[in-house]
Amino acid sequence: MQDKVVIFDTTLRDGEQALSASLCVKDKLHIALALERLGVDVIEAGFPVSSPGDFESVQTIAKTLKKSRVCALSRALDKDIDVAAECLKVAEAFRIHTFLSTSTIHVKDKLRLQYDEVIEMGTKAVKRARRYTDDVEFSCEDAGRTPIDNLCRMVEAAIKAGATTVNIPDTVGYTLPCEFGAIIENLFQRVPNIDKAIISVHCHDDLGLSVANSISAIQAGARQVEGTINGIGERAGNCALEEIAMIIKTRENTLKVKTALKHDEIHRTSKTVSQLCNMPIQANKAIVGANAFSHSSGIHQDGMLKNKNTYEIMTPESIGLSQKSLNLTSRSGRAAVKNHMQQMGYSEKEYDLPSLYASFLKLADRKGQVFDYDLEALMFFNNLQEEDDHYKIKYLSVQSGNIMATTSITLQCGAQEISDAAIGNGPVDALYQVIYRITQYDITLDKFDLTAKGEGENGLGQADIIARYKGRKYHGTGISTDIIEASGQALLHVINSIYRAEQISKIKKKTSLKKEK
Ligand code: KIV
Ligand code: ZN
């Protein structure tokens, strides 16, 4: 049996479907590129038939990636499979992933089918997908609760029909590691053609066992693990791939398997996903939590000073976490900024140096010293902004205290400048009232979060909002030394996205009218 475990990432599909506001194409591509750099073998980029937006982002990712294989999900339906194939055909290498429920409760109450019909439908779907590619994955949804005889029949039939990977999901996160390992063992003992496919696992974390279950499955012979970065996903999430990666690396001698991942990209990939998905990481999270490598007890610190191996089973450097904190001032030139970005592992492809440098200078003037985490935050923020943003803050002044707050603002609205002021029960309320009034958008604010990026008084304020407009949810982010300005930027981020979408749909309408004439 091969010793390589294939890493299948579903951050952009199973992970993304659980976010409160969906990601735009640009953010999805940014994450896909980070996953490719991490060395992920297969990237499940989305579910193309589910929406035109999903189709567009899967296709953009399929066109761009050169090393990772791009995969798209489809139900076991002809239409889904055909749309997935149409979307993926631009890729250098692609996989179609089709799935069907196999547990008794799903088959009886959700699909309302007999088990023979499920086998027939699954087989038909695999055969149809094989018309387009020789890389087809079939998933037995809710396999963790499927009677083993039925599961064996389905796996054998899917392989016979041409599936090259068969995935065994613990969809509801119910099984125990010993039970899940036994399912995989049983499949290896009882399915006669099992050697013709890779057996994959896909575990959810409802009982906090997704990683343990996946490791148990690897020990029983599974050679593909599916999961997401930081474990984001439905309900309690999916199996956290950074944990799988570091378990396999740290316990290689026992597990006797390996992955093709570049472990020193883990920290950066995790940060990118957390930032763009607006999903903060708990401080004590294994591998990527802020405290994962910090030792607080005096006894531990003493041991670490004498010999790091006393309390450290892996180094922070192994996941790409740099211990150094660099700093720059307004006298630092472009080359110094580029150099620091390089030292943090960012290539110039990932950011626009002139606009990063312009933001750096503004920040350096306000803050004096600019640290590596500031540069990173500026890079994320600059990547979120578009050159053609219609609305921009030109001038902002706030008065607040134990009185009603007043905000005065001048907004650049395309070629026009509009000034106005409003009062509110706090400075952010006053600011949002005046922005709503100027831009005339009827927006509902669902969520507002403020976090400090960086250390102590030196940090930057980051505002993240979830706002609703005409039934759709948007995520907006702003970063500044001033938290009120950051809050305003977050709202304008949302408004600019809405404005841009409206302009695009106006243009589309005009062109279709012209065609009709
Ligand atoms: O959890 C699950 O069963 C899934 C399948 C679509 C693979 O996400
Ligand atoms: Zn899932």
Image (cartoon, helix red, strand yellow):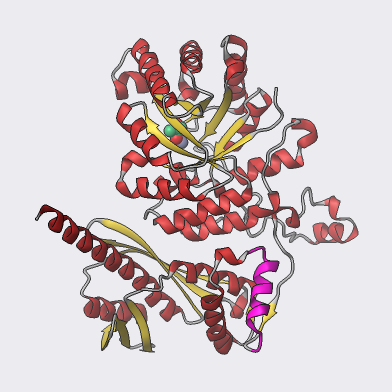
Q: Position of residue 491 (x, y in %)?
A: 35, 72
Q: Position of residue 422 (x, y in %)?
A: 26, 85
**Which residues make up the magenta segment?**
331-346
Q: Residue furthest left?
A: 517
* Frontmost residue, 371 versus 57: 57
Left or right: residue 112 versus residue 177 is: left
> Quarter containing ligand 1?
top left
Q: Is residue 342 magenta?
A: yes
Predominant secondary structure, magenta span: helix
Residue 19, visible in the rendered structure: yes
Residue 405, visible in the rendered structure: no
Residue at image location 46% in from the left, 19% down from the top: 146
Q: Position of residue 401 (x, y in %)?
A: 39, 88
Q: Is residue 79 magenta?
A: no
Q: Residue furthest right?
A: 306
Q: Is residue 199 above or below residue 210?
A: above
Residue at image location 28% in from the left, 62% down from the top: 501
The quadrant where residue 345 appears: bottom right
Locate the N terminus by quadrant: top right
